[in-house]
Image (cartoon, helix red, strand yellow):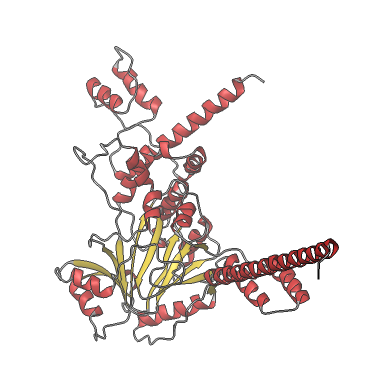
Amino acid sequence: MATSDHDTSSYSQTSSGLSKGTNKRRRWMTEERDRKVRTKQRAKELEDGIRDTTIDWGSYDIDFIASSPGERELHDFLQRLERVSMFAKTRADTTARLLSNLRQNPNKLDILAAIHSELSNLPQDDVYLLTDAKSLGDALSKPFQIPLLHRVTASHSSLAPATNFGIQELLEHLAGDKEASISVYDYSVPDPAKRTRQTTVHEFLSCFRSGNTCRTALNFLDIENRTKIQFCPSPIILQDITTKLDALIQHDKGKTGSEWRAERPKEFFLAAKRNAISTIHIDMGGAVTWVLILEGRKIWYFPRHVSSRTVRWLALVGSQTPEDYEGGWVKVELRPGDLLVMPPSFPHAVFTPDDCLAVGGQFYTTGHLGRSTEGLRLQEDYPDVSNEELNDSVYSTLARILNTCSPVMTSLEKSQVASSQSLFPGRPSPATYDEHSKESLTNILKSLGVAIPSKAKKHELLELLKRNNTRVACTPREKFLDAFWKLCDEFMADNTSAEDCSDSSPV
C-alpha cells in the first residue's frame, strides 16, 4: 500500500517531537545529575571546613600528688588558675559548631531562629587560628594583639620541618657531654628564689631515662639547639627584622667569591617532666616568642585581655596570683607539631600534663618594634615579671636594629616607636669632653657624622656636641638609647619636612 505525502509528513513531525522531548529529558537528567554532584561537593567542602575549624581540646589531670611544700604551693596555684580559665574560643570554631548542629535540624524555622540567636552572640577570637604558612606570614607582617595558633589536623600538617626528633633524640645528642651545665626549674625547692638552679646534662639524662622515677617537678630550660636542625618555620625567619636588614647588605649572590655567611636564629629546647608548672611571667626583652611542640603536650594559659596595665598588675600581685585579671584567663592545648606565637611582653603560665619536649625562640618584627621598646621598659621597671634577667645581648640586638631599620619600616611603624619617648626620660646629654684635645673632639664629631666648620675652635666643637645632643655611648644600654633617640629624631624630622611641603603646596 502506498504511503501518502501527508502521512509521511505527520510521521516526521511526530518523530521530531519525540526526539526533542527525549533530548530535553536527557538534558534535564544531566543537569539534575550535575546538580546533585555539586550539592555533594559543597556538602563535603562544608564538612571539611567544619572539621578544620572545630577545635577539639584534649583532657588532662591536675590532681597529681604534691609531696613537698614547694610542690603543694604550685599545685594550689594551678588549681586556682584552672578555676578562672577556659579553653580558647574563635568565631570560626563557634560558627562551625553552629553549622554542624543546623545540618541535623530539618525544620527551617528552627534553623532561622538558631541563626538569629547565635550569630549575634559570636565571641571575640581568643587566638588567631592559622591554616598554613601563608596565613602565618600574613599575620606576622602586621601587629597582632592575641596569640597565633597553628594546630595539626588531618588537612593541615605542621609548619615545622618533617622530623622525628623527640626526647630520645635529644638525649642521644647531649649524651656526649654529660658534665655540661644546664638550667633547671625545680619547684620542689621551698624558696622560689632558688628554684632555678644550675645542674648538669647527667641529671637531665638520668631524669628522662626510660624506667627512671625521678621527681616530677623538673623543667629544664633554654637548652641551646646545636643539632643543626632548624625547627623555626620559614615565615618567622622571613618576618624577623634582622633577616630583612641582612637582605639590604650588598653581597655577591653567586657562590664564587661570596663572603656571605648565614646567621641562624637561635633556638632553645624546653624539656619538662610530667606535671611541671611555670608560673605567670613574661618573656625577656620585649621580643615576639614562638614555641613548637616536638613531643608530649603543654597547656598554655594567658589573660584574655593584655595591655601594659596587665603587666603592671602582674608586678603588683606576683606570679602566683591568677585572680582579678580582666576577662579571666584563656588556655590552649599544644600537641606535637602545634605552633604558638605570642606578642611581645605577653603574660602566660604553662602546665605540662605529659613528659614534653618543645623548641622555641624569640625575634623582633617591624610591626611590633614599638611594643617591643615598651615591653623592654616594663621589664626594666618591673624585673620580677620575667623569669630571666635582662642582659646586654638584648640591648645590643635592639641597638643594631634601631640603627639600621629605617629602610624596612613604614612611617606608621616608626611613629609607634617614637611614641615610646616618654618611657625613656632624661634624654642622654653629651659627656664632659673638656679633657679631650681639639683633635680628639674633631675625631668624635666625624665618627658621629657631624659637619665641622673649617678652623673651628675647641669651644665651638664642644658647642657642636651639645647642639647635636650626642655622646660617646659606652654600655650596651647607652648604645640602645642612642639608637632609639636617633630613630625618633629622624622620624620627627621627616614628619616635619612632610608637613612643611604640605603647607607650601599650592591650593
**Is residue 267 in view from this perspective?**
yes
Question: Does 443 sit left or right of 53 as displayed?
Answer: left
Q: Is residue 70 above or below residue 467?
A: below
Query: Residue 174 lies in what quarter of the image?
Result: bottom left
Image quadrant holding the C terminus, namely: top right
Q: Residue at x 61, y 73 (%)?
A: 97
Instruction: State the image coordinates of residue 165 (x, y, percent, origin top left).
Output: 28, 70
Q: Residue at x 81, y 66 (%)?
A: 3
Residue 323: x %, y % from top left: 53, 71
Q: Which of 455 and 503 lies nearest the eye of the viewer? A: 503
Q: Quadrant of residue 449?
A: top left
| Residue sticking out furthest to the front | 1
Left or right of residue 427: residue 356: left
Residue 284, compared with residue 153, is above or below; it is above
| Point 31% across, 45% down: residue | 396
| Residue 321 seen | no
Of 272 and 316, the residue lying toward us: 272
Q: Position of residue 270 (x, y in %)?
A: 32, 68
Report how many numbered discs are placed on residues in the image: 0
- Percent coordinates x, y for residue 119 in the rendering: 69, 67
Residue 147's place in the image compared with 294, above or below, is: above
Looking at the rendered image, the quarter that the N terminus falls into is bottom right
Q: Would you identify the image quadrant in which residue 503 lies? A: top right
The front one of 425 and 233 is 233
The residue located at (14%, 69%) in the rendering is: 176
Name of the residue lying farthest toward the right: 6
Identity of the residue furthest to the top in this view? 455
